[in-house]
Image (tube, rainbow, N blue to C red):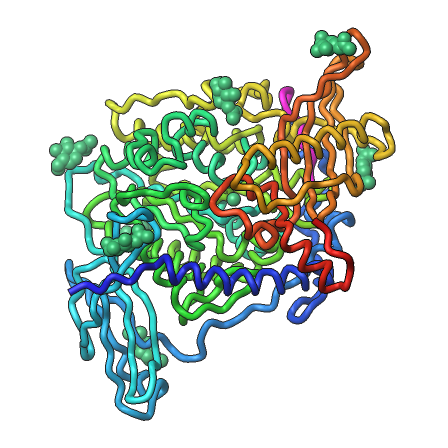
Amino acid sequence: MFVAVSMDLQLIYNYKYIFVIMVVLNMLYFIFDGSSFNGIDKVQLDSSPFRENKKYIIDTPGCRIENLNPYSEEIKEYIYTIKKITCRNKGLLTYISRFKDKVILNLNMSLLPEYSIFHVDCCYSVISRNPTGSKPDDNISFSDCIPFHDTVHIKHDFIRVECSNFFQKVYVNVHSTLQPPKEVATNAADPNVLLIGIDGVSRSNLIRSMPRTYQFCERNRWINLKGYNKIADNTYPNLMAVLSGMNFSQAESVCDPYDKVALDNCQHFIWREFKRHNYSTAYAEDTSRIGTFNWIKAGFTNPPTDYYFRPYFLAAEDLSIKYLCLRAHCTGPEKTGIRMQNLIKDFVSTIRNATPGFGLFWMNSFSHEDVNCPSSLDDDFVDFFEEMERGGEFNNTIVIFFSDHGFRFGKIRLTHTGWMEERLPFIYIRIPESFRLKHLEAYSNLVSNSDKLTTPYDIHMTLQHILSLSNKNYVESPSQGCPQCKSLFKPIESSRTCGTSGIPQPYCTCSRYENLSKKTPLVREVANFFISHINNLVKSYGEASKGCSVYFLDKISHAKSLVIEKNVEENVLVGVVANPDAIFEANVKVIYNSNATKTFTLMETNRLDRYAPKTFCVQNSPVQMYCYCKSLLKRITNEKGHRTLN
Ligand SMILES: *[C@@H]1O[C@H](CO)[C@@H](O)[C@H](O)[C@H]1NC(C)=O
Ligand SMILES: *[C@@H]1O[C@H](CO)[C@@H](O)[C@H](O)[C@H]1NC(C)=O
Ligand SMILES: *[C@@H]1O[C@H](CO)[C@@H](O)[C@H](O)[C@H]1NC(C)=O
Ligand SMILES: *[C@@H]1O[C@H](CO)[C@@H](O)[C@H](O)[C@H]1NC(C)=O
Ligand SMILES: *[C@@H]1O[C@H](CO)[C@@H](O)[C@H](O)[C@H]1NC(C)=O
Ligand SMILES: *[C@@H]1O[C@H](CO)[C@@H](O)[C@H](O)[C@H]1NC(C)=O
Ligand SMILES: *[C@@H]1O[C@H](CO)[C@@H](O)[C@H](O)[C@H]1NC(C)=O
Ligand SMILES: [Zn+2]
């Protein structure tokens, strides 16, 4: 008997709750300007990993990238330590173990007295996806709760456990069981490939906020691509470039993320190729609400990979939550980031004797909302990676430990350093000894490519190359978004530029923008053009944007220029503070016409303030990125006792 509980209602309820918290925290954030409120102290910065004598971190004929100082004066005021929080003060009452091919749920009897002085009864319910309704990827249900004593054999993928005494629930948790895969014919030497991602962390920010993890990677000679440049603004297109080799518009046309049928049928996901090679495939992402394929997107009707952990995180995020940096840091008794690490560990060990594995494990829960928050998982990552290395779990595993872009909003983004960091996500690649010895040349190419300009498309080609190295019949297909991009195991030419590697000009860190005075008439013209563009754009959404306010230009926060050809063509980057409260940044191409007029073309738009709490009047529409809800304006002005604006 299954009792269908619609996740949707619960999510809406949670969402309101999250919203209130976000508004409050957001106010604190701005009142204190992110520098010193409860739990946050200024830190003494250790600047040792920064090689100050180098002017450029990448210095090739095709591209020079400035050697950014992670501790630059310009951003010091935005850097602070985050006080860690603990998710529980007792041991976990339940855990999963394996006996041969059986998965067992166990109760740790010795812990019972800590949980209750009275008798405790436990039961588990099975968590299932409900692919039939209108929200297949958001809808999970729980079976009736089945009582068990100390141990029980579990055949389902995800379960929720509840333990109660006569008076109350004393323990609730969810577990992912990772049932073993069927054995298939594979080449025993095929390496596992794990993509382990932390959203929104630049190379500089890894050094700054996860110094121990950074040192671990360096010490273990994981290879750092120092010129890894994003190819688009946010998560979806950058990850899609890795997974499919396509750019945003190509992906949209053949694998439309707004159409669940198209996403389900999308043949371009690299995990499909790994599956064809008898790999077991996995995809997990925490903070389900903002999932790469779910945030204002359709999600999947059917699981895209053999192991698909979305129901697990939906259920975990429905437990009691402790927030840190605006995100569900603790989901029930466990840290969300550690749940992810455990999935990786279990995935590798479950499949070990049956098939090689390909997995994407993506984390937002401790990095997405605060540039300093990755520090809250720094020690955990070192412990996790050390355990994997020591236990031999990574013996035959290629790990790509990376991010999609740097931190994208807040005051740090208004600085030059913040602008550069946003474009330069961190990436480390771990090559196992066995693979290195077998492919010495490939390895040495990778090492020399680590000092060149590289992109997510190169990672896509590298993944294909891994398949073709173990299977002679596999034919690599060029990346559609960047036909010239190539596997990092092949030599990349030093003449490579942003133009030849699929990086649109607004994201290119090889370009040298010059400061432009905010008072320049051109800057004001561009800013006005931009504001009216945003207003028109918002209006064009019609009904969907009827709650959104019109903007006026308040002030210009920064301006830079890249002259392509003097008095002919120029790119102008301008940051504008709008009224009501929103910060946008534009990259505008300026063409000087022969009749003394100018033509402006908008190449990129960014919103730099934390806009989610200001856009509640928009439901599931991309206009959210441009909106400021009028009703919020009314509320704020009323509270201040001012005249109501409209
Ligand atoms: C059960 O709990 C005890 C007490 O905290 C702990 O020492 C032990 O490691 C736990 N057992 C398992 C198998 O987790
Ligand atoms: C969730 O799944 C249940 C059971 O299959 C179904 O009755 C319900 O309509 C679904 N809800 C949504 C919003 O899809
Ligand atoms: C995958 O496994 C099947 C069944 O064991 C086998 O027939 C097939 O050749 C394997 N494919 C590859 C690419 O190894
Ligand atoms: C994607 O690539 C195609 C073909 O090169 C190009 O026409 C298109 O503008 C690109 N789209 C984006 C968003 O870069
Ligand atoms: C990993 O490799 C080491 C050294 O070759 C070996 O001793 C160990 O048993 C391997 N571990 C696993 C889990 O394969
Ligand atoms: C540009 O302006 C920023 C901020 O005002 C300053 O830190 C930087 O040094 C300037 N760069 C140049 C090349 O003048
Ligand atoms: C000036 O030239 C541009 C481009 O050639 C054209 O679009 C524009 O209408 C012209 N403006 C005037 C006032 O002639
Ligand atoms: Zn992202």
Residue 10 image-quadrant placement = bottom left
Q: Nearer the viewer, residue 388 or 314?
A: 314
- Quadrant placement of the N terminus: bottom left
Is 617 in the magenta? no
Residue plotted at (25% across, 28% down): 471
Q: Nearer the viewer, residue 149 or 443?
A: 149
Q: Position of residue 130 (x, y in %)?
A: 25, 52
Examine the rendered structure and indicate whether residue 259 appears above or below residue 646: above
View quadrant of ligand 7 = top right
Examine the rendered structure and indicate whether residue 623 appears above or below residue 49: above
Examine the rendered structure and indicate whether residue 529 appears above or below residue 370: above
Residue bounds of the magenta highlight: 60-68
Q: Position of residue 231 (x, y in %)?
A: 54, 31
Residue plotted at (71% across, 23% down): 571
Q: Position of residue 145 (x, y in %)?
A: 22, 72
Residue 619 visible somewhere in the drawing: yes
Q: Position of residue 590 (x, y in %)?
A: 73, 20
Q: Nearer the viewer, residue 473 or 162?
A: 162
Q: Nearer the viewer, residue 338 or 300?
A: 300
Name of the residue lying farthest toward the bottom: 117
Is 66 in the magenta? yes
Residue plotted at (45% across, 24% down): 486
